[in-house]
Amino acid sequence: MKFNKIENGEYELDVTGYVCPHPQLYTLKCMEKLEDGMVLDVLIDNPSSVESVTQACNGKGYEILEKTNPKSGVTALKIQK
Amino acid sequence: MADAIASYRHKLYAIGVLGFVVILSLLYYFSAPVYIYIIAYMWFGFIYGILQQYGRFCFASAFRDLIMVKVPRMFVGIIIGLIMLSIVNSYIVAVYPDKYIIESIGFHGLLGGIIFGLGMVLAGGCATGSLYKTGEGNMISFTVLMALAFSQAIFTAIPRPYPGFDWFQAHFITGKTLNDIGLTKVLFGGVGNPNAKYSFIQHLLGDTLINAVLVGLLLLIGVYVLVVRKPFLKRRARQIAATAGATADGGTAKTGFKDELAGFWSMISASRRTSIAAILIGIVAGAQIFTLAWLQNRYNFTNFGQVLAGKPAIGQKLPNGNPVSPAAPASWPQTHAVPPQVSKNNTVFDPGYWYITTQEAMFGGWVLHHIGFSVTNNTYFGLNNGIPSPWLSPALLLSIGLILGASFKSLLAREFKWKFPHSKSGFAYAIGGGTLMGLGARIGLGCNIGAFYGPAAFGNPSAWVFFVGLFVGAALSAKYINYFANRKMASDDMDFDIKL
C-alpha cells in the first residue's frame, strides 16, 4: 500500500488489494499523521472497509468531502481532517 | 460511455447468477420433488448473502473494528439481529417444541471461542463473513474457507494422540450437555423434563427477554460508555456552545441525560445499512427454521439423511408431533445412499437453521475420503453427519447459495472485484486464520453462528460463554495486528510503500 504526497496539504493512500482490517486501520493511521485541514484521498476495493472508514470518520469528526466509484469494485474517498 | 457499458455488463452478470440458481433449483426439483428441501436451504443462503453483502455483516468486524478503530456499527448490528431472531424463534419453538436448540455449556465454549476469535481477526472475516466476501470475488476469503474446511476435517478425523484424550475431552473440554439450561425452563419450571412445552409468551419472557434483550442491552450500554460516549458528548457540548454563542469557558457547555440518550441513539442508528440488514437477517433466520420444519412435516422426515438413504425414521416424531409414516413417499429419490454417504444412523448434517462451519468440514471430509484417507472412524463423520456428496449436503447448499447471493448483490452494486492474496504473508494470514477458526469451531462445537447466534437466540447461556471467548481472542489478534501496523508506521516519513 502506498502513501504519497500529491500536493501541498493533500495526500493519497492506495490500499486496494488488501482485506479487513488493513484498509480501515491504515487509513485511520494515515489520518493521524496529517494536520488539521489536510486532505487524504484513499482508494479501497474492500466494501466492508469503506463502511468502517465512513463510520470511524463520523466518530472522529473527519469530513468525507467526496465519495466516488472510479471503476467497478473500487471506492475513492476524499477525507479532510 | 465506457462506464455505462460496464454497469450494463455487471447487471447482466447479476442476472446470470440469479438465472443459474433458478435453473439449478428446477433441476433439483424435477429429479425428485423432496429436493425442494435443499433448494430451500440454497435460497435462504442466497438471501443471507444479499443481506450480508448489503449490511457488510461480519462478526469479526463486530469485535475488531470496535477495538481497533472504535467503530461499533457491527457490534450493534449483531445485537439487533439477535433480538429479532430470538423473537421469531420464541414463536417457532412454541409451535415446534422439538426445534428448541440447547447446546452444552462448559469450558469448551470459552476455549473454542478464544481460538475462533484469534482466527477470525487474522483471517479478515468470520466464517459467514468469509462466505459473503468470497461472493464479492475475494479469493483471499475463499482461501480462508478452504483452510476452515480442511482444518476441521483433519482435526476431526486424525486419531487422537493418546488414549486418555477422549476422556479428557469429555470431562474438561466438551462440557456437559445439560438439557435444562434454556432460560424458559429455569423460569417456568420443567428442568429435568425434556418434553416440557411452553407458550410463545413464556419463551418470549425467558429466552428472548433475558438472554437476548437484557444481556444485549447491557452490552450495548457498555460499548456506549466505553467507546462512544466521550467523543459524542464532547462534540455535543461544542455544538450547544456554538448555538448559544461563545462562552467564557472556551466554547464548551454542560450536557445532560437527554444528550446521553441522543448519544446512545446515534450509536444504534449510525450505520443504517448494517441495522436494516440485521433486522432482516434475524427475521429470515427465523423463517428458515419454520420453513424447513414445515417441509419435514410435509415430506415425512426428521433429517435429510433418511431421504437420501430411502429409510423413514420409524418410531420418531415429525416436528409437528405426528409419528413418521413407515412408507417412503414417492417424492423421495429412487436411488439410495449408503454409509458413509449417510451416517450409520441414516443422518447427514441437517441443522435446520442458519449454520456455517460444519458443512465446510463436511466438504473437507468428503475430499479427504475421496483421495483415500479414512475419516469416518469417529462420531462426527461416522455416526452423526456421514459424508454426503457436496451437491446433496443440505447446509453446504446454504453456503453455496450465500456465496451466489453475495455475488448477485455485489454485481448489482458494482462492488464485485476479483482479489487474490497479494503476498506470502497475506496468504499466511488467510491460511492461519482459517485454520484457527476451524479448530475453534470444532472445540467450541460451532462457529459464531452455530455456537453463538443460534443458541443465544434460543435462551442458551452457553452462547455467552462462547461470546466472551470470541471477544478475548479477537482482542488479542487485534492487538497483534495493531502492534505490527504501528511498527511499520513508526517513522515520521510522510511517504511510504508498505507490503504486508
Image (cartoon, helix red, strand yellow):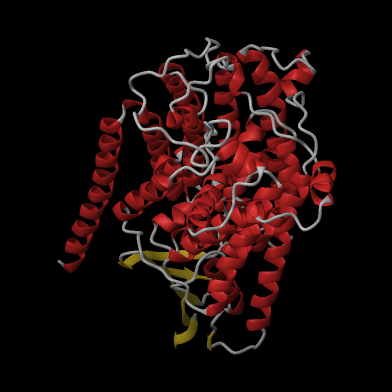
User: Depth check: B276 or B199 in front?
Assistant: B199
Displayed quadrant of residue B92: top right
In the rendered image, is residue B351 in sight? Answer: yes
Displayed quadrant of residue B491: bottom right
Query: Relative to residue A25, is residue B48 depicted above or below?
Result: above
Q: Residue at x 52, y 23 (%)?
A: B302
Query: Residue B16 location, x and y as percent?
Result: 23, 50
Q: Residue at x 63, y 31 (%)?
A: B457
Query: Residue B66 location, x and y as percent?
Result: 65, 56
Query: Residue B240 location, x and y as percent?
Result: 62, 50
Q: Residue at x 77, y 51 (%)?
A: B111
Displayed quadrant of residue B329: top left
In the rendered image, is residue B238 in sight? Answer: no
Query: Relative to residue A39, is residue B52 depicted above or below?
Result: above
Query: Residue B355 location, x and y as percent?
Result: 54, 40
* Quadrant including the C terminus of chain A: bottom right
